[in-house]
Image (cartoon, grey):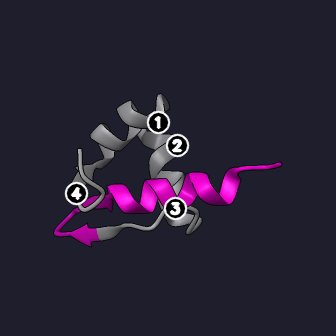
Amino acid sequence: MSNDEILTVKETAALLKTTRQQVRKMIVNEELPAVKVGREWRVLKAGIVEFFEKQICY
């Protein structure tokens, strides 16, 4: 899976091991970058990597 891959909300939820509702909440709260295509959200895998990098605590 390359970082330029585009994922659906369902695929993103499976990857993050969370619910689709939680992914949508993260998108609306601008925690996870996404683009709306028609009626559905799309998430770049690079955005997920960026999200995790911001969450890392040392």
**Dot in front, 2 or 3:** 3
Q: Of label 4 and label 2, which has the lower sequence position?
A: 4
x and y, in percent, of residue 58 in the image: 83, 48
Q: Of label 3 and label 1, which has the lower sequence position?
A: 1
Amino acid of disc 2? Gln
Q: How many marks?
A: 4
Residues at discs 4 and 3 in contact (Cβ within 8 Å): no
Give the magenta range.
Answer: 36-58
Residues at discs 1 and 2 in contact (Cβ within 8 Å): yes
Amino acid of disc 3? Glu
Q: Residue furthest right?
A: 58
Amino acid of disc 1? Leu
Circle 3: element type: helix
Q: Is residue 17 above or below residue 10?
A: above
Residue that label 3 marks: 50
Circle 4: element type: strand
**Dot in front, 4 or 3:** 3
x and y, in percent, of residue 30 in the image: 55, 69
Give the Cα distance between marks 3 and 1: 13 Å
Image mark for residue 22: 2
Residue that label 4 marks: 6
The answer to which image quadrant residue 45 occupies is bottom left
Q: Residue furthest left?
A: 38
Q: Of label 1 and label 2, which has the lower sequence position?
A: 1
Q: Is residue 30 above or below residue 2?
A: below
Tag 2: Cα neighbours inside 10 Å, few (<14), some, or many (≥20)?
few
Tag 3: Cα neighbours inside 10 Å, few (<14), some, or many (≥20)?
some
Give the Cα distance between marks 4 and 2: 18 Å
Give the Cα distance between marks 4 and 3: 14 Å
